[in-house]
Image: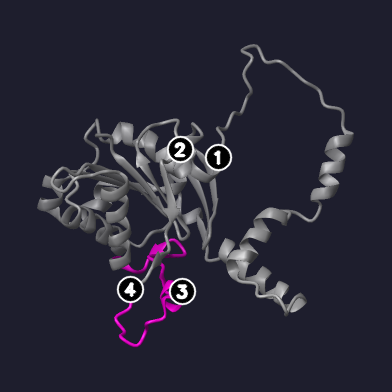
Amino acid sequence: MEAVVIDAGSKLLKAGLALPDQEPSLIIPTEMQGMVEDDQLTDKTELQDITVDPIVRGVIKNWDAMEDLLRYVLYTRIGWEIGNEGQVLFADPLLTPKAIREQLVQLMFETFNVNGFYATEQAVLSLYAAGRISGCAVDVGHGKIDIAPVWEGAVQHNASRKFEIGGMDLNELFAKELRKSYPQINIDLSLAEKLKETYACTAEDQIAYEETRKAVQAELHTLPDGQPPEYMPENMLKNSAWMGGAILAKVVFPQNQHITKAEYDESGPSIVHRKCF
């Protein structure tokens, strides 16, 4: 069985078998419906409104919910069978705390009984997807923004920056402004997000840019090999970390660069810092 690549964000989890040049087979919300032990809570509508976020601004905060989410992904959707588990490559957010990395590798080996595990940072994987080992990766997500320069496959952490602001903050701000203008309408965050994604411009001068672009006469050039100089597959920007993980998985697992069960049993969770970087 091919290794499973997982890129878990604050809003979406992307997973699938490591098949390069393909998109993840599974893209699902990270947010989960919570269970409440309260006899007085009998209204099903109220129960549906209770949600749990395993990951907040890129960091795993609720490990019980994360375990449930991964169990659903690996066994129900990917098709693992108990006692016949495979290998996992996990995309780490920028500057993930050491304790989080250790707890994740512990969860993988002790709860899911994987026979191989590897993790590396999303910035590196995104560049791999673009056929690069050096560059600057900018990841604008639901709960954070990561900016990471990468040199020959290694993140330069001293020059990296992480900002705890993302799409969710724009949704809240947009909803707040809409409620001021339309107090009679119930505007929730999901509606604000849909409106933002459908109508919002990314720059104030977008219209001027489009007018200028249309006014300039286009010049077409054919390269010697007939190929465009920079080709990016559809949806690569959204799925680049996962796609890079699929590429890397075809290298680290066949070449035994990953953490094995025997190595984990001998060294414990701290081995993730020596073998995954």
Residue with the mark numbered 1: 235
How many neighbours does mark 2 have within 10 angstroms: few (below 14), some (14-19), or many (20 or more)?
many
Residue with the mark numbered 4: 35
Task: Name the spot of residue 207 as percent of width and height, x first.
Answer: 83, 49
Q: Earlier in the sequence, mark 3 or mark 4?
A: 4
> In this rendering, would 37 be left or right of 51?
left
The circle on residue 49 is 3
Image quadrant in which the N terminus is located:
top left
Which one is nearer the viewer's eye here, 184 or 81? Answer: 184
How many neighbours does mark 1 have within 10 angstroms: few (below 14), some (14-19), or many (20 or more)?
few
CB within 8 Å, label 2 to label 3: no
Secondary structure found at label 1 = loop
> In this rendering, would 110 be left or right of 28?
left
Q: Earlier in the sequence, mark 1 or mark 4?
A: 4
- Of badges 1 and 4, the one in the foreground is 4
Q: Which residues are magenta?
A: 36-63
Q: Earlier in the sequence, mark 4 or mark 2?
A: 2
Spatial CA span between label 1 and label 2: 8 Å
Residue 118 highlighted magenta (yes or no): no
Q: What amino acid is found at the position of numbered circle 3 in the picture?
A: Asp
Residue with the mark numbered 2: 23
> In this rendering, would 65 be left or right of 262?
right
Q: Earlier in the sequence, mark 3 or mark 1?
A: 3
Q: Earlier in the sequence, mark 2 or mark 3?
A: 2
